[in-house]
Image (cartoon, grey):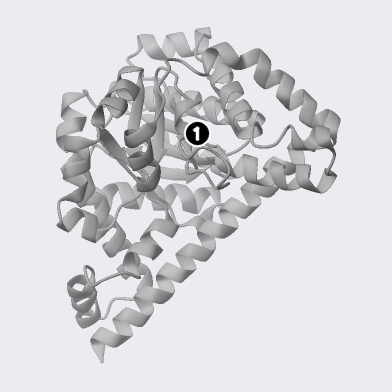
Amino acid sequence: MSDILKALSDEGVSIWLDDISRERLRTGNLEQLVKDKHVVGVTSNPTIFAKALSKGSAYDDQVRDLAVRGVDVEEASRAITTYDIRWGCDVLRPVYDRTDGLDGRVSLEVDPRLAKDTEKTVAEAKALWWMVDRPNLFIKIPATEEGLPAITATLAEGISVNVTLIFSLERYGKVIDAFFAGLEKARANGHDLSKIASVASFFVSRVDTEIDKRLDKIGSDGAKNLRSKAGLANARLAYALYEEKFATDRWKALKDAGARPQRPLWASTGVKDPNLVDTLYVDELVAPGTVNTMPEATLVAEADHGQVRGDTVRGAYDDARAHMAALKDAGVDYDDVVRVLEEEGVEKFEASWKELLGSIEGELKDKSA
């Protein structure tokens, strides 16, 4: 089974798990995935934490201690999530050391309620970086307009950043510019650029979900033939933009100063349409220097029956451009699609965060009774 995943890794794709939980850590499951499934990183988000806390008893002892101390729900949420992330960082530390800091990374997201507040996002990023206190941590910051200067300011502090919720090519270009600006400021601040890492999380399946919904509404045969291809086309054009931006003199100056490139990360790679092959967003997005963060079901599927055929991105730029043009001709408004997806993405994470806080609040009350 693992031969397929090894082949994927050998093509330059870092395999990360899009999940973390106290149970997964406590049972040694994460260590096993690192050993057997070539997993070299972990991402988390508010939805993952809300789900983890709702299952089993793994958090009971910590929640009881927090209740005894009388901490409020905000402090408790940070204590619970940073505990898991710190543990995850320790599990992945050998990978971090072996790859000279390229992989072995674990991501923790800032409170999504701060997505529209630059100053508070930066302050929260610094606080979480201090609380986890591990060099292989990534702080996740959403790529909202307000998030862009926060990305620059956080990197300028020497903090590694996973930029999340990227849907549009225009915004992705701004994310790369924010990354360059952050490294330039970090260098001016005396930080070692070789110690600062970043990935840009470009979402895939959600693009297909939204565009397919619009194509179905149009209803023509031509529209139906365009279904379930936009996510891949959009991501492939993002990689083309990555290649273009990282061939500039601006990047060369940073590279000469020791900087590492901000790698494209394919997020939202679990297939949501049951009519599609469940490994679609892995097999069709193979390119060197990328990360694919997968839900466990997608990881297992890829290990079992994935089709690794070499680079499936760089030879497909013309087809990707043609597909996006065909969508426009069919009446799909790309700018509106990505606007809706960003707004929904922030709202979903806010809702999950509120669910998490509600669960913690209920647990604190139960344990203190």
Q: Residue at x 48, y 23 (%)?
A: 180
Decide if residue 108 is on the left or right side of residue 321: left
Q: Examine the rendered structure and indicate whether residue 349 appears above or below residue 66.
A: above
Q: Secondary structure at mark 1?
A: helix
Query: Vertical placement of 257 versus 188: above or below?
Result: above
Amino acid carrying mark 1 in the image: Tyr
Residue 85 in the figure: left or right of residue 198: left
Q: Nearer the viewer, residue 242 or 315?
A: 315
List x then y, in percent, for residue 203: 54, 39
* Quarter that holds the C terminus: bottom left
Q: Is residue 32 visible?
A: yes
Give the image location of residue 218, x and y in percent: 84, 44
Residue 158 in view here: no
The residue located at (27%, 36%) in the rendering is 39
Q: From the viewer's side, name the closer residue of 275 and 350.
A: 275
Residue at figure coordinates x 40%, y 42% from the top left: 298
Give how far across and how far down residue 153 sits, in percent.
46, 37
301 displayed left or right of 241: left
Q: Which residue is under mark 1?
A: 281
Count of number-bearing discs: 1
Q: Quadrant of residue 89?
A: top left
